[in-house]
Amino acid sequence: YDITNTLVMSQTGTQRQRGTYWTVYKCDALRRVVYTSEVNIGHADYDYLWNTWDKLYVKESFSLTPQANMMTNTGYTRSFYHIHPTTLLTVNYYDTYEFLDLMADSVRNHMTFAAFDDNDTCASAKGLLTGTRTYYLTGTEGYSETVYYYDYRGREIQRRSTNHLGGYDVLSTKYDFANNVTDTWSSQSTSNGLTTTEHYHYTYDHANRLDTTIYTFNDA
Protein backbone atom coordinates (compact mmCIF):
# COMPACT_ATOMS: atom_id res chain seq x y z
CA TYR A 1 0.00 0.00 0.00
CA ASP A 2 1.06 3.59 -0.53
CA ILE A 3 0.88 6.42 1.98
CA THR A 4 -2.88 6.82 1.36
CA ASN A 5 -3.52 3.12 2.16
CA THR A 6 -4.32 2.46 -1.49
CA LEU A 7 -3.32 -0.97 -2.82
CA VAL A 8 -0.48 -0.48 -5.29
CA MET A 9 1.12 -3.95 -5.58
CA SER A 10 0.12 -7.56 -5.03
CA GLN A 11 1.70 -10.91 -5.76
CA THR A 12 0.10 -14.33 -6.16
CA GLY A 13 1.77 -17.63 -5.41
CA THR A 14 2.04 -18.30 -9.15
CA GLN A 15 3.76 -14.97 -9.74
CA ARG A 16 6.23 -15.68 -6.94
CA GLN A 17 7.07 -19.06 -8.47
CA ARG A 18 7.79 -17.32 -11.79
CA GLY A 19 10.31 -15.04 -10.12
CA THR A 20 9.93 -11.35 -9.34
CA TYR A 21 6.59 -10.60 -10.98
CA TRP A 22 4.00 -8.40 -9.29
CA THR A 23 0.63 -6.93 -10.25
CA VAL A 24 0.83 -3.12 -10.02
CA TYR A 25 -2.23 -0.90 -9.58
CA LYS A 26 -2.04 2.73 -10.68
CA CYS A 27 -4.65 5.25 -9.46
CA ASP A 28 -5.63 8.81 -10.22
CA ALA A 29 -5.93 11.65 -7.69
CA LEU A 30 -9.35 10.34 -6.61
CA ARG A 31 -7.81 6.89 -5.93
CA ARG A 32 -9.66 5.25 -8.80
CA VAL A 33 -7.71 2.50 -10.54
CA VAL A 34 -6.69 3.79 -13.98
CA TYR A 35 -4.63 0.78 -15.09
CA THR A 36 -3.22 -2.49 -13.85
CA SER A 37 -0.15 -4.27 -15.16
CA GLU A 38 2.19 -7.13 -14.40
CA VAL A 39 5.71 -5.89 -13.75
CA ASN A 40 8.96 -7.78 -13.41
CA ILE A 41 10.66 -5.65 -10.77
CA GLY A 42 13.91 -7.62 -10.90
CA HIS A 43 14.37 -8.37 -7.19
CA ALA A 44 12.64 -10.05 -4.27
CA ASP A 45 13.48 -7.65 -1.43
CA TYR A 46 10.05 -7.48 0.18
CA ASP A 47 11.20 -5.30 3.09
CA TYR A 48 12.51 -2.74 0.60
CA LEU A 49 9.19 -2.77 -1.27
CA TRP A 50 7.19 -2.32 1.90
CA ASN A 51 9.32 0.49 3.26
CA THR A 52 9.45 2.27 -0.11
CA TRP A 53 5.80 2.21 -1.19
CA ASP A 54 4.57 3.00 2.31
CA LYS A 55 6.09 6.48 1.97
CA LEU A 56 4.96 7.24 -1.60
CA TYR A 57 1.83 8.83 -3.01
CA VAL A 58 1.15 6.88 -6.21
CA LYS A 59 -0.80 8.99 -8.70
CA GLU A 60 -1.06 8.91 -12.49
CA SER A 61 -2.87 11.34 -14.80
CA PHE A 62 -4.36 11.31 -18.29
CA SER A 63 -3.21 13.57 -21.11
CA LEU A 64 -3.36 13.51 -24.88
CA THR A 65 -0.18 15.59 -24.91
CA PRO A 66 2.94 13.36 -24.87
CA GLN A 67 4.80 13.49 -21.57
CA ALA A 68 7.85 11.78 -20.13
CA ASN A 69 7.35 8.12 -19.19
CA MET A 70 3.92 7.58 -20.70
CA MET A 71 2.27 4.17 -20.32
CA THR A 72 2.23 2.73 -23.83
CA ASN A 73 -0.65 4.06 -25.95
CA THR A 74 -2.98 4.61 -22.98
CA GLY A 75 -2.73 8.37 -22.46
CA TYR A 76 -1.68 7.81 -18.84
CA THR A 77 1.58 8.72 -17.18
CA ARG A 78 3.88 6.05 -15.78
CA SER A 79 5.62 7.58 -12.78
CA PHE A 80 6.83 4.35 -11.18
CA TYR A 81 8.55 1.29 -12.70
CA HIS A 82 8.82 3.03 -16.05
CA ILE A 83 12.01 1.12 -16.97
CA HIS A 84 10.88 -2.35 -15.91
CA PRO A 85 9.34 -4.98 -18.24
CA THR A 86 5.59 -4.44 -18.08
CA THR A 87 2.54 -6.27 -19.41
CA LEU A 88 -0.67 -4.24 -19.36
CA LEU A 89 -3.77 -6.01 -18.02
CA THR A 90 -6.56 -3.43 -17.79
CA VAL A 91 -7.08 0.30 -18.39
CA ASN A 92 -9.95 2.45 -17.10
CA TYR A 93 -11.08 5.91 -18.18
CA TYR A 94 -13.32 8.30 -16.26
CA ASP A 95 -15.22 11.58 -16.51
CA THR A 96 -14.71 12.40 -20.23
CA TYR A 97 -14.42 10.75 -23.64
CA GLU A 98 -11.09 12.29 -24.60
CA PHE A 99 -9.56 8.81 -24.78
CA LEU A 100 -11.54 8.18 -27.98
CA ASP A 101 -8.89 10.27 -29.75
CA LEU A 102 -6.40 7.45 -29.06
CA MET A 103 -8.37 5.12 -31.32
CA ALA A 104 -7.93 4.73 -35.03
CA ASP A 105 -10.59 6.60 -37.01
CA SER A 106 -12.12 3.35 -38.27
CA VAL A 107 -12.57 2.12 -34.69
CA ARG A 108 -13.67 5.44 -33.20
CA ASN A 109 -16.48 5.72 -35.75
CA HIS A 110 -17.97 2.49 -34.39
CA MET A 111 -17.40 3.42 -30.74
CA THR A 112 -19.11 6.84 -30.86
CA PHE A 113 -22.59 7.12 -29.34
CA ALA A 114 -25.50 6.68 -31.73
CA ALA A 115 -28.89 8.07 -30.69
CA PHE A 116 -31.72 5.52 -30.58
CA ASP A 117 -35.47 5.62 -29.97
CA ASP A 118 -35.38 9.29 -28.88
CA ASN A 119 -32.60 8.61 -26.37
CA ASP A 120 -29.52 10.79 -26.28
CA THR A 121 -26.42 10.83 -24.10
CA CYS A 122 -25.72 13.44 -21.43
CA ALA A 123 -22.92 15.87 -22.21
CA SER A 124 -21.27 15.26 -18.81
CA ALA A 125 -20.05 11.94 -17.45
CA LYS A 126 -18.26 13.43 -14.45
CA GLY A 127 -17.57 10.81 -11.80
CA LEU A 128 -18.49 7.90 -14.07
CA LEU A 129 -16.53 5.15 -15.78
CA THR A 130 -16.46 6.05 -19.47
CA GLY A 131 -14.18 3.43 -21.00
CA THR A 132 -12.14 0.30 -20.40
CA ARG A 133 -9.51 -1.83 -22.06
CA THR A 134 -8.99 -5.50 -21.30
CA TYR A 135 -5.82 -7.03 -22.67
CA TYR A 136 -5.74 -10.55 -24.06
CA LEU A 137 -3.58 -13.01 -22.10
CA THR A 138 -2.14 -14.51 -25.28
CA GLY A 139 1.34 -13.03 -25.32
CA THR A 140 0.25 -10.38 -27.83
CA GLU A 141 -0.57 -6.71 -27.29
CA GLY A 142 -4.17 -7.11 -28.39
CA TYR A 143 -7.07 -5.88 -26.31
CA SER A 144 -10.80 -5.27 -26.37
CA GLU A 145 -12.22 -1.80 -25.71
CA THR A 146 -15.55 -0.72 -24.24
CA VAL A 147 -17.12 2.74 -24.10
CA TYR A 148 -19.99 3.55 -21.71
CA TYR A 149 -22.56 6.28 -22.34
CA TYR A 150 -25.06 7.64 -19.79
CA ASP A 151 -28.21 9.73 -19.65
CA TYR A 152 -28.71 12.81 -17.48
CA ARG A 153 -29.56 10.57 -14.49
CA GLY A 154 -26.26 8.71 -14.73
CA ARG A 155 -27.90 5.54 -16.05
CA GLU A 156 -25.99 3.56 -18.65
CA ILE A 157 -27.91 3.80 -21.91
CA GLN A 158 -25.36 2.50 -24.40
CA ARG A 159 -22.28 0.30 -24.31
CA ARG A 160 -20.10 -0.12 -27.40
CA SER A 161 -17.27 -2.67 -27.51
CA THR A 162 -14.78 -4.25 -29.85
CA ASN A 163 -14.76 -8.04 -29.90
CA HIS A 164 -12.31 -10.86 -30.61
CA LEU A 165 -13.98 -11.54 -33.97
CA GLY A 166 -12.82 -8.22 -35.39
CA GLY A 167 -16.27 -6.70 -35.08
CA TYR A 168 -18.28 -4.73 -32.55
CA ASP A 169 -20.87 -5.35 -29.83
CA VAL A 170 -23.47 -2.70 -29.02
CA LEU A 171 -25.98 -2.73 -26.17
CA SER A 172 -28.56 0.05 -25.86
CA THR A 173 -30.96 0.35 -22.93
CA LYS A 174 -34.15 2.36 -22.44
CA TYR A 175 -35.77 3.11 -19.06
CA ASP A 176 -39.13 4.37 -17.89
CA PHE A 177 -39.72 7.10 -15.31
CA ALA A 178 -39.46 4.53 -12.46
CA ASN A 179 -36.04 3.36 -13.70
CA ASN A 180 -37.40 0.07 -15.02
CA VAL A 181 -35.69 -1.25 -18.14
CA THR A 182 -38.30 -1.21 -20.90
CA ASP A 183 -36.17 -2.12 -23.92
CA THR A 184 -32.72 -3.44 -24.73
CA TRP A 185 -31.25 -3.62 -28.21
CA SER A 186 -28.06 -5.58 -28.81
CA SER A 187 -26.02 -6.28 -31.91
CA GLN A 188 -22.91 -8.35 -32.57
CA SER A 189 -20.84 -8.07 -35.73
CA THR A 190 -17.77 -9.80 -37.13
CA SER A 191 -14.97 -8.70 -39.44
CA ASN A 192 -16.67 -10.38 -42.41
CA GLY A 193 -19.77 -8.22 -42.05
CA LEU A 194 -22.07 -10.78 -40.39
CA THR A 195 -24.36 -9.05 -37.89
CA THR A 196 -26.98 -10.41 -35.50
CA THR A 197 -29.45 -8.28 -33.53
CA GLU A 198 -31.70 -8.91 -30.54
CA HIS A 199 -34.47 -6.80 -29.00
CA TYR A 200 -36.13 -7.36 -25.63
CA HIS A 201 -39.24 -5.37 -24.68
CA TYR A 202 -40.48 -5.44 -21.08
CA THR A 203 -43.76 -4.28 -19.54
CA TYR A 204 -44.61 -3.89 -15.86
CA ASP A 205 -47.74 -3.84 -13.74
CA HIS A 206 -48.88 -1.07 -11.39
CA ALA A 207 -46.42 -2.27 -8.71
CA ASN A 208 -43.44 -2.20 -11.10
CA ARG A 209 -43.38 -5.99 -11.28
CA LEU A 210 -42.31 -7.54 -14.58
CA ASP A 211 -45.41 -8.46 -16.54
CA THR A 212 -44.39 -9.47 -20.08
CA THR A 213 -41.21 -10.01 -22.08
CA ILE A 214 -41.18 -9.88 -25.87
CA TYR A 215 -38.10 -11.11 -27.74
CA THR A 216 -37.18 -10.33 -31.36
CA PHE A 217 -34.22 -11.81 -33.22
CA ASN A 218 -32.79 -10.12 -36.33
CA ASP A 219 -35.91 -7.94 -36.59
CA ALA A 220 -37.99 -11.02 -37.41
Image: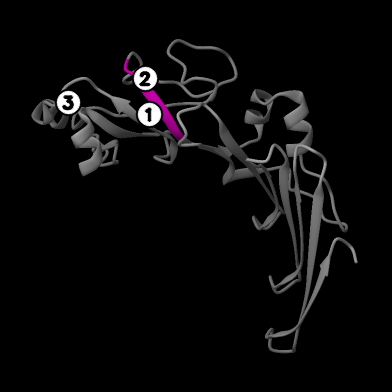
Task: Tell whether position 88 is magenta.
Answer: yes
- Which badge, 2 or 1, is on the more N-terminal residue? 1
How far is disc 2 from disc 1 in space, using C-alphas?
Answer: 8 Å
Q: Nearer the viewer, mark 2 or mark 1?
A: 2
Q: Residue furthest right?
A: 220
**Which x, y percent locates residue 165?**
67, 41
Q: Is residue 23 above or below residue 140?
A: below
Q: Is residue 201 above or below residue 1?
A: below
Q: Secondary structure at mark 3?
A: helix
Q: Which residue is mark 3?
A: 52
Residue kind at label 1, given as amino acid type: Lys
Q: Which residue is mark 2?
A: 79
Cβ atoms at labels 2 and 1 below 8 Å apart:
yes
Q: Is residue 21 above or below residue 4?
A: above
Disc ID at residue 120 = none
Q: Which residue is mark 1?
A: 59
| First to last magenta residue range | 84-89
- Which badge, 2 or 3, is on the more N-terminal residue? 3
The residue depicted at 75 percent of the width and 88 percent of the height is: 205
